[in-house]
């Protein structure tokens, strides 16, 4: 993660929701003006929850900016076949 844009990106996965919310809050408290929350597949709903918790409960000055949705080709670990996986990027800023 050498680029500054990558260090302001939170990748949402299987950890508890509060871990991602705290990571975002920490970045904002350290002076970051904008972050990106990224997720793929089943974690998309958790990424949306993170954005909603940040904007509605914790910090009213944080707002959702741009939202990007996409489909990525991923190789299945079980079958080796290529599968389409949905992904989302939620840009949050002060």
Image: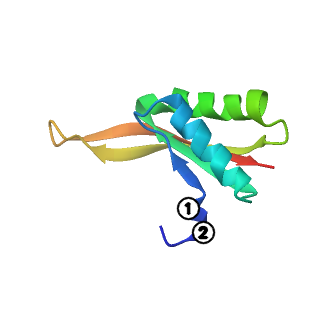
Instruction: Tell me how many marks there are.
Output: 2
Residue at 39% in and 38% down: 85
Q: Secondary structure at mark 1?
A: helix
Quadrant in which residue 65 is drawn: top right
Can you say whether 4 is above or below 89 in the image?
below
- Residue 69, image x, y percentages: 57, 41
| Colour scheme of the rendered structure | rainbow
Residue drawn where x is 47% and y is 30% of the image: 16
Label 1 crowd (10 A; few <14 / some 14-19 / many >=20): few
Look at mark 1 in the image and give the residue it sits on.
Answer: 7
**49 to the left or right of 87:** right
Task: Report which residue position mark 2 lands on.
Answer: 4
**Front residue (pair 43, 20):** 20
SS at badge 2: helix
Residue at 79% across / 37% down in the picture?
59
Left or right of 62? Residue 49 is left
Residue 47, position as x, y percentages in the image: 56, 34
The answer to whether marks 2 and 1 mark residues whose Cβ atoms lie closer than 8 Å is yes
């Amino acid at each position: 993660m050498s680029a500054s844009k990558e260090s302001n990106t939170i990748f949402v996965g299987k950890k508890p929701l509060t871990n991602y919310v705290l990571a975002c809050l920490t970045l904002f408290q350290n002076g970051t003006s904008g972050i990106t929350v990224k997720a793929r597949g089943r974690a998309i709903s958790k990424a949306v929850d993170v954005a909603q918790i940040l904007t509605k409960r914790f910090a009213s000055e944080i707002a959702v900016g741009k939202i990007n949705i996409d489909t990525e080709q991923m190789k299945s670990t079980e079958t080796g076949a290529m599968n389409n996986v949905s992904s989302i990027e939620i840009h949050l800023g002060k």
